[in-house]
Image (cartoon, rainbow, N blue to C red):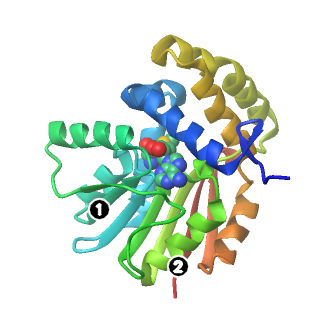
Amino acid sequence: MTHKVNFGDELVSPEEKTRRVSAVFSSVARRYDIMNDLMSGGMHRLWKDRFAARVKPRAGEDILDMAGGTGDVAFRMARRGARVTVADINADMLQVGEERARHRGIAGLTWKVENAEALTFRDATFDGYTIVFGIRNVTDIRSALHEAHRVLKRGGRFYCMEFSSSDWPGFSNLYETYASSIIPRIGKAVAHDEESYRYLVESIRRFPRPEAFKRMIAEAGLVRAAAEPMLGGLVTIHSGWKI
Ligand code: SAM
């Protein structure tokens, strides 16, 4: 029997999942930023600010922002003086990001199409590896974590921010209703794409809870793995170090 993985709630082959995830982001690329504001009520900006503050990028550091999409996190880190490589499997997302960087006058970023599961960078290239709202879309998460470990220098830091289901009793019910019925409707009205937003909600529901993901980070060889859950684990900042 061929190995199957989840694409949202559906079981598909790993190749099919990678292809469909790519189609989702090509479809949403042009409306991605406005949809983030609408779906989170602007909160994603605060989460990303907090994330960049945790990473503490410094001038002269090389940071890989994996699954960097349209550059939101990379811009925040570049403003702090780091040299940032924005890598993503989807060229359409990167293209929107490059246009945004040009409009905002943010220079010095490198944009590169890369699959997080099999990076083309040499061992020990980066001082920091970041991945925000990206890893739950990756087909083989364990391979991506091993690649993160490989491309980090000794002493390099890994930071990941991801959604999962919340365990706050009242809030989690409220969120479930919002996510399953309202987000796909906003997707339909604004991005003309209900299915992609249904996938995004389902992928959040399926992502491991913070403690389980923390164990996966440790298994990839990153030490002092830590998780900082917000909103009862709906959004968590994960970190680890390479020694
Ligand atoms: N980090 C950005 C942000 O927070 O605004 C973009 C997040 S977006 C929800 C997820 C991104 O993950 C998409 O741009 C998608 O193309 C990318 N992605 C999915 N699978 C990937 C993979 N295997 N390798 C690299 N990027 C991937």
Name above or below for residue 63 compared with residue 22.
below
- Give left or right: position of 164 versus 152: right
Quarter-of-image position of residue 153:
bottom left
Q: Residue at x 59, y 78 (%)?
A: 222
- Cα–Cα gap, marks 2 and 1: 19 Å
Q: Which mark is residue 84?
A: 1
Between tags 2 and 1, which lies in front? 1
Q: Residue at x 62, y 20 (%)?
A: 184
- Give left or right: position of 76 versus 224: left
Kindly state the secondary structure of the residue where label 1 is placed.
Answer: strand
x then y, percent, for residue 145: 58, 68
x then y, percent, for residue 94: 33, 44
Q: Residue furthest top?
A: 189
Quarter-of-image position of residue 129:
bottom left
Name above or below for residue 62 compared with residue 168.
below
Q: What's the residue type where badge 1 is placed? A: Val
Name above or below for residue 111 compared with residue 214.
above
Look at the numbered disc 1 and say if its residue's Cβ is closer than 8 Å to ligand 1. no
Q: Which mark is residue 220?
A: none
Q: What's the residue type where badge 2 is placed? A: Trp
Q: Residue at x 60, y 14 (%)?
A: 185
Q: Which mark is residue 241?
A: 2
Kindly state the secondary structure of the residue where label 2 is placed.
Answer: strand
Contact (Cβ within 8 Å) of mark 2 with mark 1:
no
